[in-house]
Image: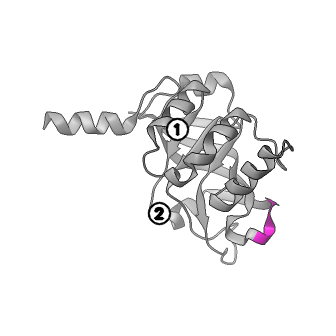
């Protein structure tokens, strides 16, 4: 299987062209957000207020960063477990998020919501945070700096590796893997 070069933010036709199992190299912008930032976003939306960052068409990376060493934009920046963000995902899909990146499976409800809102869920290399850091060219804290490592950051990335785990049509790489193991 070949690797597809893709640019973020995504357009609808980009999302619809992806299939579960596609290998990707992403270049462009993505935003980081973890549990604490998601909780703040949920509280903001519950109050009927706008989010401090426009999410329409954007990609969220559930990233656990470490301090940047000299000469680097960020330290190790591997994915964190995505399922922890599931309870916050539907309101963000309603805000127009088109892609999320993390590791591991999502709940059946979140998988359904991703399909219903024409988005994708991507996974990247767990345990390879130092390698991924080399793909991050620029980091800027956008909001909630008091959350430190959990602040929302804007990343500029080049050739960031990911695999399409859930596509916008219900394709699921985890189901594909399970089906392969059943045949063995």
Q: Does residue 84 belong to the magenta stretch?
A: no
The numbered disc on residue 54 is: none
Element under disc 2:
loop
Above/below status of 128 relative to 7: below
Q: Quadrant of the C terminus?
A: top left
Judged by depth in the image, the label closer to the viewer, 2 or 1, is: 1
Q: Nearer the viewer, residue 51 or 152?
A: 51
In primary-sequence order, the first of circles 2 and 1 is 1
Q: Quadrant of the N terminus?
A: top left
> Which portion, as a residue range, is magenta?
142-146
- The crowd level at tag 1 (other Cα within 10 Å; few <14, some 14-19, many 20+) is many
Residue at 56% of width from left, 32% of height from top? Answer: 113
Q: Looking at this rendering, what residue extends furthest in the bottom direction?
A: 70
Residue 178 x %, y %: 26, 38
Q: Is residue 134 visible?
A: no
Q: Which residue is mark 1?
A: 110
Element under disc 1:
helix
Q: In screen coordinates, is 142 left or right of 131?
A: right
Q: Which residue is mark 2?
A: 128
Residue at 71% of width from left, 58% of height from top? Answer: 37
Residue 109 x %, y %: 49, 36
């Amino acid at each position: 299987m070949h690797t597809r070069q893709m640019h973020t933010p995504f357009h609808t036709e980009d999302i619809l062209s992806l299939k579960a199992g596609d290998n990707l190299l992403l270049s462009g912008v993505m935003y980081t957000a973890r549990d604490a930032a998601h909780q703040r976003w949920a509280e903001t939306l519950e109050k009927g207020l706008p989010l401090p960052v426009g999410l329409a068409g954007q990609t969220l990376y559930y990233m656990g960063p470490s301090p940047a060493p000299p000469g680097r934009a960020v330290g190790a920046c591997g994915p964190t477990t995505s399922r922890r963000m599931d309870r916050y995902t539907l309101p963000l899909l309603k805000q127009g998020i088109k892609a999320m990146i993390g590791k591991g499976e999502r709940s059946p409800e979140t998988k359904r919501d991703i399909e219903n809102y024409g988005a994708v869920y991507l996974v990247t290399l767990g345990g390879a945070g130092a390698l991924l850091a080399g793909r991050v060219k620029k980091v800027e804290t956008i909001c909630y700096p008091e959350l430190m490592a959990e602040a929302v950051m804007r990343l500029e990335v080049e050739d960031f590796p990911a695999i399409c785990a859930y596509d916008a049509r219900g394709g699921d790489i985890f189901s594909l893997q399970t089906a392969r193991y059943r045949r063995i």
